[in-house]
């Protein structure tokens, strides 16, 4: 910065300036570093706390939903044969179901044709799925069309109908047949083709006894509590009110038990999510407020929110609600559901007691958790003021970010002050160096001049 210094005086000006600047800079820089570190630690800790609180609030909202307690579940004892779902208006009950056969679509085929068959005339093929069941599909076929071209024309016209065309060729005889496959299930929904004049070889007749029907479309056949029933599809929606049965496979000798009941599984899952979220919050706050001793004389490791009043207020409010009585009809506290506080402050669940409470007091459990006076709403009101947008924790983070900005500004000021001080010291020391050099030069001149005067006796070495 100052070039070559100290020539006149012989002093190490760079070292001297550096030492003075360091002595001035070090205390303030150390103070700012400590403040910056503490500020960042608190911002990070508050962010961790807000994340845990957000997860906790999500679990509260999931359990504070009356629809959860209105839902009904339909369980099948053999999902390989049948699955079931129920709407919230379904009546509880148990049903014995047997599946004799599934509903299927048809497979039909043209008469055997030469593999090099070509149409002799242009015309129209009219495809129908079941007599009078649906709209006919007319497919235009050109003169001289091969079976492959006929297949492609049919598939293009039938792409949204659930019907596909394919070719099967006998490798021995070389004869080919156009096969029509349908996903439209139900008795009478066989795929037929009526051909215009000149295309009669492509007719498919589905009348009784026709050899052109490879597999007839059929209804599903099943029984509920011994009553025989049929359906055109494998999705049964009206046999049991507000319950949908989905037939998967048939086995007429196996009885399937379908149980329609309150959705205890869904409620249990949400209760466990609430407990897990609370336990995570407790573990998080313990970590953020913990003081860990390091060795006999080492500096203890402290969490980012040791002694923090917000943490104490949050936990105090939550824990007060957890032990407050509410609800009615045998469910007034969490302990009535088998949920109790463990030695480490977390919650534990007695699964058997929870199951018994749901089976015997399902509606009372719903009232305990949900509604404006339910536990979930009360807990959320204790937390929301801290964690909401613009809430206490957000304001604290904002204040800490302001502190960070102030630290940055102070660092910039310190840098400018140190630069100014450095320049001033170099100027002063260099001026001194120059003066010393001048004095040394004057001293040497005087000594030389005086020594040459008459009568001056020179010192001998």
Image (tube, rainbow, N blue to C red):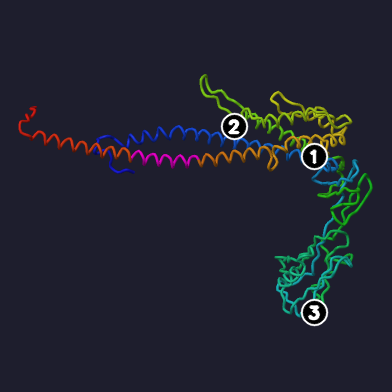
Give the secondary structure at mark 2.
loop
Specify whether 50 is left or right of 83: left
| Mark drawn on residue 64 | 1
Q: From the viewer's perspective, is the residue at label 1 or at label 2 nearer?
A: 2
Q: Main secondary structure of the magenta part?
A: helix
Question: Where is residue 451 drawn, in percent x and y?
Answer: 9, 33
Figure check: 144 above or below 337: below
Q: CA distance from mark 1 to mark 2?
A: 32 Å
Figure check: 212 above or below 286: below
Residue at image mark 2:
304
Binning the other alpha carbons within 10 Å of mark 3 as few (below 14), some (14 to 19) or many (20 upward) gives: some
Q: Which residues are magenta?
A: 410-426
Question: First in sequence: mark 3 or mark 2?
Answer: 3
Q: CA distance from mark 3 to mark 1?
A: 71 Å
Residue furthest toward the top? 296
**Quadrant showing the N terminus:** top left
Question: First in sequence: mark 1 or mark 2?
Answer: 1
Question: First in sequence: mark 3 or mark 1?
Answer: 1
Give the secondary structure at mark 1.
loop
Binning the other alpha carbons within 10 Å of mark 2 as few (below 14), some (14 to 19) or many (20 upward) gives: many
């Amino acid at each position: 910065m100052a070039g070559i210094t100290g020539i006149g005086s012989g002093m190490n000006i760079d070292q001297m300036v550096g030492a003075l600047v360091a002595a001035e800079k070090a205390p303030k820089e150390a103070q700012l570093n400590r403040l910056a570190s503490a500020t960042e630690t608190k911002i990070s800790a508050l962010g961790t706390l807000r994340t845990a609180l957000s997860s906790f609030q999500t679990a509260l909202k999931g359990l504070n939903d009356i629809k959860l307690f209105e839902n009904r579940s339909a369980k099948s004892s053999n999902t390989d044969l049948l699955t079931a779902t129920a709407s919230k208006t379904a009546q509880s009950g148990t049903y014995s179901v047997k599946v004799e056969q599934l509903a299927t679509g048809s497979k039909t085929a043209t008469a055997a044709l030469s593999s090099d068959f070509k149409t002799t005339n242009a015309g129209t093929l009219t495809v129908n799925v079941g007599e009078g069941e649906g709209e006919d599909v007319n497919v235009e076929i050109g003169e001289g069309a091969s079976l492959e071209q006929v297949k492609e024309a049919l598939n293009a016209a039938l792409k949204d109908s659930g019907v596909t065309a394919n070719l099967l060729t006998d490798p021995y005889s070389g004869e080919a047949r156009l096969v029509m496959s349908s996903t439209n299930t139900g008795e009478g929904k066989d795929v037929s083709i009526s051909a215009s004049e000149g295309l009669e070889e492509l007719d498919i007749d589905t009348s009784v006894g026709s050899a052109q029907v490879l597999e007839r479309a059929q209804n599903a056949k099943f029984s509920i509590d011994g009553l025989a029933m049929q359906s055109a599809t494998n999705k049964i929606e009206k046999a049991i009110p507000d319950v949908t049965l989905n037939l998967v496979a048939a086995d007429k000798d196996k009885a399937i038990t379908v149980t329609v009941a309150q959705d205890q599984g869904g409620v249990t899952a949400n209760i466990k999510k609430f407990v897990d979220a609370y336990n995570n919050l407790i573990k998080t706050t313990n970590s953020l407020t913990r003081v860990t001793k390091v060795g006999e004389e080492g500096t203890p490791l402290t969490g980012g929110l040791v002694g923090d009043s917000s943490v104490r207020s949050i936990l105090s409010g939550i824990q007060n609600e957890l032990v407050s009585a509410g609800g009615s009809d045998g469910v007034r506290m969490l302990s009535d559901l088998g949920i109790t506080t463990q030695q480490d402050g977390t919650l534990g669940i007695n699964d058997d007691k929870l199951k018994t409470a749901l089976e015997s007091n399902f509606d009372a459990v719903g009232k305990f958790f949900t509604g404006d006076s339910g536990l979930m709403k009360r807990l959320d009101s204790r937390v929301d003021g801290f964690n909401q947008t613009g809430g206490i924790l957000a304001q604290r983070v904002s204040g800490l970010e302001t502190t960070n900005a102030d630290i940055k500004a102070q660092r910039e000021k310190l840098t400018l002050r140190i630069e100014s001080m450095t320049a001033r010291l170099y100027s002063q020391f260099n001026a001194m160096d120059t003066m010393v050099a001048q004095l040394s030069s004057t001293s040497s001149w005087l000594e030389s001049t005086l020594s040459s005067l008459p009568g001056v006796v020179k010192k001998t070495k």
